[in-house]
Image (spheres, rainbow, N blue to C red):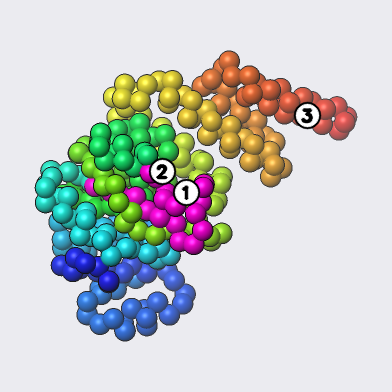
Amino acid sequence: MMQSFQDFELIVVDDGSTDNTREIVDRYGPRLQYLYQENRGPSAARNLGVKHARAPWIAFQDSDDLSLANHLESLYRYTREFPDCGMVFGNGRYIGAPEHDRDTIIPAKKSRRLAEKGVRLADLFTKSIVRLQASLIARKVYDAIGGHDETLWISMDLDLAFRIFMNAPVGYLDQSLFAYRKHEGNIGRDQELRLTENIRVIEKLLRDYPQAYNLLGRTAVTRRLAYRYYRLAKGRWRRGDPTAARHAIDEAISLRPFHLKYRFYQYRWGRGERKGLIHGI
């Protein structure tokens, strides 16, 4: 609660923990509102928290990250200047050692460009830059688009950002507003789930908002989807699931039929299947 801006309510949602979370929260007194639900995932937990919130602006904070002191003040100041925005977000930094040879999650040059020239759908699409821990979202917009998709466990931030962008203005601040703790326990480390959800979210964007094709360009869309299917195929092959791997690489090729690398793996894995059949005979 060490925020320079203090006019906020704090809601803690316990998503089925088995430790002493309730006991710890109670030590902070009435300033914190504690909510418990059986384990239903991060999207459901966030929706529950928003349902009980009274404020017109919503900020999210994951349990293993740190909100910097300027977080709420900087974002709220922006909404006072631009009250019609659906969401404003900023940058974050890593806890401990830098990652990808940089200190911030969004590279410094790109961060400056987003602040100066505005956020495009392509910015959200190419690198999934939105971290809700660095955002402030208009409650009326969150409710209007149906909140978080509770079937998603990893790509829910990207999905929400897409839907907010397609329905309301989105702003950006060139400031680090939270500190991200990356460790092996992060659910985002689950590569299979991360890729399959990412594909679902992109397909959902294109299905619900056909105009996204024009904003992104068909080439960018097919390139990203095909690459996701290719990564999915390689992971499945390494885990010993050749049938699922071949299905994924076929999907990649259906999107980019002349991509030589994808064709190579299709041939290589198909050849391995034929050899296995012959050996079995």
Q: Position of residue 162 (x, y in %)?
A: 32, 38
- Element under disc 3: helix
Q: Which amino acid type corresponds to the residue marked 3 in the rendered image? A: Gly
Q: Position of residue 272 (x, y in %)?
A: 78, 29
- Element under disc 1: loop
The residue carrying pointer 3 sits among few (fewer than 14), some (14 to 19) or many (20 or more) residues within 10 Å by Cα, namely few
> What whole-number distance in Å separates the C-alpha atoms at marks 3 and 2?
42 Å
- Callout count: 3
Q: Which residue is mark 1?
A: 102
The N terminus lies in quadrant: bottom left
Instruction: For marks 3 and 2, give the one nearer the viewer.
Output: 2
Q: Which amino acid type corresponds to the residue marked 2 in the rendered image? A: Pro
**With respect to residue 106, does 177 lie above or below?**
below
Q: Is residue 195 rendered magenta in the image?
A: no
Q: Position of residue 6 (x, y in %)?
A: 18, 69
Nearest the viewer among 20 and 66 is 66
Q: Which residue is mark 3?
A: 272
Marks 3 and 2 in Cβ contact (< 8 Å): no
> What whole-number distance in Å separates the C-alpha atoms at marks 1 and 3?
41 Å
In magenta, the rendered stretch is 88-108
Query: Residue 233 vs residue 180: left or right?
Result: right
**With respect to residue 148, does 20 lie above or below?**
below
- Element under disc 2: loop
Q: Which residue is mark 2?
A: 107
Q: Which amino acid type corresponds to the residue marked 1 in the rendered image? A: Arg
Nearest the viewer among 143 and 281 is 143
Q: Position of residue 44 (x, y in %)?
A: 35, 57
Nearest the viewer among 250 and 117 is 117
